[in-house]
Image (cartoon, rainbow, N blue to C red):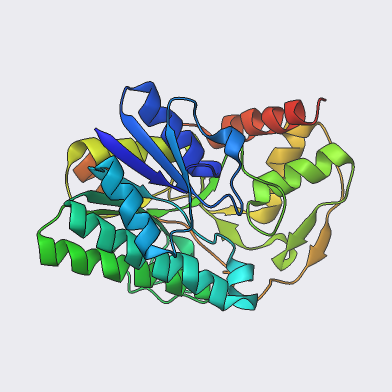
Amino acid sequence: MRVVVTGGAGFIGSHLADAFVARGDDVLVVDDLSSGARERVSEGADFAELDIADGSALRTRLEDFNAELICHLAAQSSVTVSVTNPDLDFASNVRGTFNVCQAAAALGARIVFASTGGALYGNDPAAIPTPETEIPQPLSQYGAGKLAGEAFIGTQARSDSAQHVILRLGNVYGPRQTPHGEAGVVAIFSDRLIRGETPIVYGHGKPTRDYVHVADVVRAFTTAADNRLGGTFNVGWGRETSVLELLDVVQRAAGTSVEPKLEPLRPGELDRSAIDSRLAADVLGWRPELDFEDGIAETFRWYASEHGT
């Protein structure tokens, strides 16, 4: 299969590109390196440094590659940045996704799109864990941008009768996630503890999230690619874990007992989130497998090795 991974030099995308290369697919990584790293791109993949907001350049490169499948992960990924800089979020997450849809339509390629779970459904959903049938009520421009991207992909699927897939991801963690910036709390906690710094816990530690390891997320993408079925699927455990509970697990892995600094929630952030992934199990045969505490321990060991400790 000829597979494009947008955002393939980033956290999730680099793991996904590695997985496709490992199984023998032809892979093109597209990334503007604004947050990704060139050294993360697999030696077995082609690489195009370009911004998906540039529709003409994107379409030309994907046509040259003759893409059959586009796994679209390139995005501005921070909720708080989307609130403070909505123009940046729009360019990447809305216009960029529109451009991917246009390129896919020209090529007859399928799309597997990395959307969001919690940031899409908003606060106080009717049910937690939340199913795909819940009406989205995003609180941030990030959630709104992902919802707009879903709309473009859904419209393209109906127009072309294409089997595009939308994966609404929980809070993804694992090796290669950057601790710099405002997204990726597992990475941020790990980095601060290794450096001997005080972790900052927003929402006074009470907000909950549904944490899923990057290896399980990669498997959701490859499963969707192989099943050739269309639809929208949650990808998570369906379990609420508070920020303080998460910090406790990271501290057990680190062997520390640092008292965190408690701060209020930032604009656009949710109080509670967990997503119901039974539809992915029923239709795609996908279920998360990596235990949370084991996954956190493995992730912390990776960060420790990166720091040479």
Measuring 26% from the left and 44% from the top, which residue is drawn there?
69
Q: Is residue 178 visible?
A: yes
Judge from the rendering whether residue 298 lies leftward or rightward of residue 172; answer left or right.
Answer: right
Measuring 28% from the left and 61% from the top, which residue is drawn there?
101
Q: Is residue 85 above or below residue 274?
A: below
Judge from the rendering whether residue 143 lies leftward or rightward of residue 189; answer left or right.
Answer: left
Judge from the rendering whether residue 122 lies leftward or rightward of residue 104; answer left or right.
Answer: right
Measuring 57% from the left and 34% from the top, which residue is drawn there?
40
**Extreme residue toward the left, this view:** 161
Q: Is residue 105 above or below residue 293?
A: below
Measuring 42% from the left and 31% from the top, which residue is drawn there?
45
The quadrant where residue 297 appears: top right
The quadrant where residue 150 appears: bottom left
- Name the one closer to the observer, 198 or 104: 104
Residue 292 percent coordinates (x, y):
55, 37
Judge from the rendering whether residue 258 lies leftward or rightward of residue 13; answer left or right.
Answer: right
Q: Is residue 133 visible?
A: no
Residue 184 percent coordinates (x, y):
63, 51
- Name the one closer to the observer, 40 or 132: 40
Q: Is residue 157 above or below residue 279?
A: below
Q: Is residue 2 above or below residue 183?
A: above
Q: Quadrant of the C terminus?
A: top right
- Name the one closer to the observer, 27 or 229: 27
Residue 194 percent coordinates (x, y):
83, 37
The quadrant where residue 293 appears: top right
